[in-house]
Every structure is written in structure tokens, then in C-alpha cells.
Image (cartoon, rainbow, N blue to C red):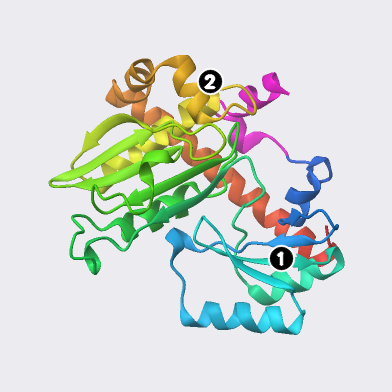
Amino acid sequence: MQACHQLLCHDGLAESASDDLTSRLINERAQANIQKDGTFSVVPRMYGGVTTAGELKRIAEVAERHKVPLLKLTGGQRIALIGVPREGLPEVWRELNMPSGHAYAKAVRTVKTCVGDRFCRYGTQDSVALGIEMEKRFGGIPLPAKVKLAVSGCPRNCAESGIKDMGVVGVSGGWELYAGGCGGIELKGGEKLGHFKRPDEVVEATAAFLQLYREDADYGERTFRWVVRRGIGKIREEALGDGEKRKALANRLAAAARAEKEHCAAETETVLMKGA
């Protein structure tokens, strides 16, 4: 498994490898999390934790029509429809008409954001815009383990960037990027990866870190353990120290993102047409 994981994360293979959907776990085939009673939780993606009145209305109507027993706001700033029977998944996904939030995947799951400088009187940067861009670029990309991101618009850190796998904090004159945080069983603060003036620099640095993590970490190894094992200094040097290498890593991650979109489209078609 580990050798296969590292092989598929390297240059060129992400786009050329074929994907056998029948080999995937039930959660991935169903694009939903199986619960202890055999029903599923459906979590549509809300980029940067932002939604619209139309989406909320549609979710409510789907929940009422299918008699979903529990609607729950998640820690990743989404809405989970919990208790959907397996046979109801295709129709629920079809009616929602929203992409999967990958709440079940070893992948980039969410990018949590605060309001940022658009409305907050303390905000120094536009955390919403950067968070949405990052989630659209990185959401769903397969990784050694689950990865959660956050973007806070100021050092008050309302999006909890300091305990995410990767966290961005807006400061006066730019952004600080942290990596290797964890807010779960083993609580750990992220370590500073760098300071950047522009949002595009943050995006490229994040991409380089994620691809290096994809290529180097063990299967199932969370970022906080990988950062401790490798050392933040060494990771910073390998991912960000050389401009050409940083761009090459980011380009390989972009290739993986394109391949995953194709795979996800095939999965969605399978769920909608045949069921999980």
C-alpha cells in the first residue's frame, strides 16, 4: 500500500494511472460516510464555509423530502445530512446538485475561514477570498491522510489556523503560513513555514508543501507527525528553498488535481446512475 501510494503521487503518474472504482471503500464509492446504523451522512462542499440562500433552501427541501433525521453544522463549516439510507444516496446527491465535500477521504477536506477584512473591524486580509480559492484548487486531492486547512484574516485566528494541517494567518503586510498542526487526539500547534506578501505566493507555497507531503509521507501519516519526523526546517528547504523546485512541486499537485476531478466525475456518475 505504501509503495503504491508513493508511486502514484509522483510526476506523470497521477494523470496516466487508471482508477478502478470498485476497489474503493464504501465511503468513497458512495461519496458519503457510513454510520453505525448502516445509513450515511451526506456532506456537500461549501467552499470556504460560504453558502447562499439558494443552497440553504435546496438543502432544506432535500432534507424534508427525504425525511433526513438530522441536519448538523460541522466543524468544517458545512451542513451534514445524517441518516440517509444507502438506496437514497443517488437521488439525494442528484437533488442537491452540489459537489461532495470529501468528508470521508484521505484528501484535502475543508478550508475553514473567518469573515476577514470584508466585514470584520479587526480583519487585516481577505480570508474568505483566499480560502475559497484554496479549496477550489486543493479540495479532494488524494493525500496520505486527511488534511484540513484554514485561513484567518488576522492574528486573532478565528478560523483556528494554528491547529490545522495547514493554516494561513493574515497579518499587516501579508500572510503567515503554518504547517503540521492538529486539533484532535494529539493536540499540536502548527509550525511557521513562511511569510508571504501576496495570496498567490501563499497558494504556491501551500501546493508545494502538499505535494512534498504526498510524495514523502507514509500512507496514513498525518501532517503533524510527518513534520515532526522530517523537521520543519528540512521541509521548508525542500518545498520552498528553491523557486524552480517549488514550481515543479506545485505543477505536479495541479496534475493530481486535474486527475482527481476526472475520477470524482466518474464516481459521481456511478453513484447517480447505479448507486454506491
For this view, does 134 lie left or right of residue 202?
right
Which comes before the other along the chain, label 1 or label 2? 1
Q: Residues within 10 Å of mark 1 (few under 14, many from 20)?
A: many
Q: Is residue 23 above or below residue 8?
A: below
Q: Where's residue 238, x and y in %?
A: 37, 18
Q: Nearer the viewer, residue 31 or 208?
A: 31
**Residue 94 shows in the view:** yes
Amino acid at circle 1: Ile
Q: Residue at x 65, y 45 (%)?
A: 105
For residue 130, the mark is: none
Q: Is residue 44 above or below residue 187?
A: below
Magenta highlight on residue 3: yes
Residue at the disc numbered 2: 216
Residue at the disc numbered 1: 82
For this view, does 113 lie left or right of residue 156?
right
Which portion, as a residue range, is magenta?
1-18
Q: Residue at x 77, y 79 (%)?
A: 66
